């Protein structure tokens, strides 16, 4: 069923004939959920004067703020016949009533024109599934006369199965999972269930004739996908609020009947009461609620529309600002790249400038360190090393002199020492110290100076 929030608003009173007593439940259905406003039990209604228990009923309504509220009566399942018809899909619509009327005589054992019936289409795949409720005229008219004598207005006579069908969908707002419920009272019990293969199953039994276990097994076989009965709370869901005297597991039939009265479009809308004897509840008590609901819906709609509109505007403005910032970011990155190139060039130029100074300081320091008897034929200076070639009276001491200069380290001969007459030829390789700063030294003795030659 399509979920329309307007169809979930209402108040209703349901009366279940439970043996010799009447179980009365008052229910309010709102958007936030279902509440049980009150529950009472009118005992021994068949033997007591109708006016007596009728006054108790009206006192119960007045105690909960209702001066008059037409009730829905759930007849005992043993006095009503419930049938399921599977008709061709073409029979739906205007032809459905004629198709059902054509088969009514084959659905009950009562005489012709001696039965009241009502039906409700359930839908189906390829067929029109129809729930049909039948009851003998004397029984329906007798209850109608009795309640009229008590001053209790009735809007409908139905069965609890119709209420279970609607309640299982209304409270949870979705079609139920396959289930089977058991409602016991004294020696009788009623079974109601639904499954994917069967729209509903409804039957009443006497435990003195049919044991509960055997009846449950037969019902499960009909439903196929159900093995064990479920609790009412698990299937329907519990009401938001309920008085202490109300117990859902015991008063479930009265509860679902009241809910069918409050929101009739969710059930079968099966009504056995003749149209001439039906009463309607005044809708004025719900006028203020309906007006407030419309106002709330309008405000909610405006707020719902306002949010997406504001979000869209904010998203557009945010995208525009992002584009502006991206342009600024691109320009900033370009300037950073230019600055990095400029810094690299400046560092390179500065390195070139310092290189000349460093090389001059290096040559000066080597010249100071080498004795005058040393004659240099060549000097190769790179960024990180120095190679010296020349002649000296003794080449070996030169390594220590160069390492102690403060500008070179790791001095070693690049080749073997050669001797020519009284002089030794050498080639020395040494590494330049990083960021070496020449240390000032005192002028060498007259015999310690070195010479460089071409």
Image: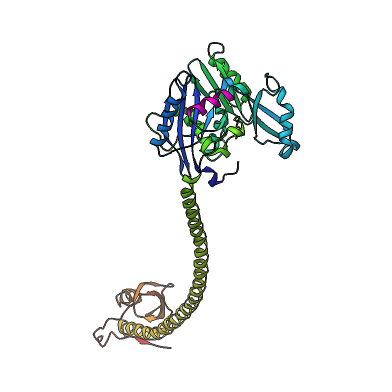
Q: Is residue 249 visible?
A: no
x then y, percent, for residue 292? 46, 52
Magenta stretch in the rendered image:
140-150
427 vs 205, left or right, is left
Placement of 414 over or under 311, stated as above or below? below
Magenta-colored segment: predominant secondary structure: helix
- In percent of width and height, residue 65 lies at 40, 39
Q: Is residue 72 left or right of residue 394?
A: right
Q: State the image coordinates of residue 263 (x, y, percent, origin top left).
A: 53, 39
* Rendered-image quadrant of the C terminus: bottom left
Residue 148's x, y, as percent? 52, 29
Residue furthest to the top: 208
- Please tell me which residue is depicted at 50% across the width and 62% down the height of the picture: 306
Q: Is residue 9 visible?
A: yes
Q: Viewed as shown, does residue 400 lie left or right of 56? A: left
Quarter holding the N terminus is top right
Question: From what the image shows, is residue 400 above or below residue 254?
Answer: below
| Residue depicted at x 49% and y 72% | 321
The image quadrant that residue 445 belongs to is bottom left
Q: Residue 365 lies in magenta, yes or no? A: no
Q: Which of 421 and 413 is in front in this view?
A: 413
In terms of depth relative to the viewer, which is nearer, 271 or 241?
Answer: 271
- Which picture quadrant has residue 409? bottom left
Q: Which image quadrant is residue 248 in?
A: top left
Give me the residue at 76% from left, 37% from top. 90
């Amino acid at each position: 069923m399509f979920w329309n929030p307007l169809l979930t608003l209402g108040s209703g009173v349901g009366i279940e004939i439970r043996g010799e007593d009447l179980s009365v439940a008052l229910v309010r259905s709102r958007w936030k959920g279902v509440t049980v406003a009150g529950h009472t039990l009118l005992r021994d209604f068949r033997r007591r004067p109708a006016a007596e228990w009728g006054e108790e009923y009206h006192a119960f309504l007045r105690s909960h703020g209702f001066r008059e509220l037409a009730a829905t009566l759930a007849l005992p399942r043993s006095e009503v016949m419930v049938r399921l018809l599977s008709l061709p899909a073409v029979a739906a619509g205007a032809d459905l009533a004629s198709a059902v009327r054509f088969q009514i005589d084959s659905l009950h054992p009562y005489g012709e024109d001696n039965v009241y019936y009502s039906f409700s289409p359930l839908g189906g795949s390829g067929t029109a599934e129809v729930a049909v409720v039948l009851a003998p005229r004397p029984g329906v008219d007798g209850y109608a006369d009795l309640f009229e004598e008590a001053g209790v207005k009735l809007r409908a006579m139905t069965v609890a199965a119709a209420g279970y069908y609607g309640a299982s969908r209304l409270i949870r707002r979705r079609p139920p999972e396959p289930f089977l419920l058991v409602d016991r009272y004294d020696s009788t019990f009623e079974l109601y269930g639904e499954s994917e293969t069967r729209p509903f199953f409804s039957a009443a039994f006497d435990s003195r004739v049919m044991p509960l276990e055997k009846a449950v097994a037969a019902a499960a076989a009909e439903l196929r996908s159900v093995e064990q009965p479920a609790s009412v709370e698990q299937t329907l869901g519990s009401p938001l609020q309920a008085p202490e005297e109300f117990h859902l597991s015991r008063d479930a039939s009265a509860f679902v009947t009241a809910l069918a009265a409050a929101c009739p479009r969710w059930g079968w809308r099966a009504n056995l009461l003749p149209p001439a004897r039906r009463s309607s509840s005044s809708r004025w008590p719900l006028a203020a609620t309906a007006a407030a609901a419309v106002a709330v819906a309008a405000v909610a709609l405006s707020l719902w529309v306002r949010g997406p509109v504001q979000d869209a505007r904010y998203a557009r403005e945010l995208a525009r600002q992002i584009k502006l910032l991206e342009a600024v970011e691109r320009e900033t990155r370009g300037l950073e790249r230019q600055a990095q190139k400029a810094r690299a060039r400046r560092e390179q130029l500065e390195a070139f400038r310092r290189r000349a100074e460093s090389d001059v300081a290096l040559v000066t320091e080597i010249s100071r360190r080498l004795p005058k008897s040393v004659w240099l034929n060549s000097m190769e200076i790179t960024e990180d090393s120095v190679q010296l070639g020349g002649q000296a009276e003794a080449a070996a001491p030169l390594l220590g002199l160069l390492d102690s200069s403060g500008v070179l380290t790791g001095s070693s001969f690049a080749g073997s020492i050669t001797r020519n007459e009284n002089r030794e030829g050498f080639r020395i390789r040494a590494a330049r110290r990083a960021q070496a700063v020449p240390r000032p030294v005192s002028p060498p003795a007259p015999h310690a100076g070195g010479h460089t030659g071409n």
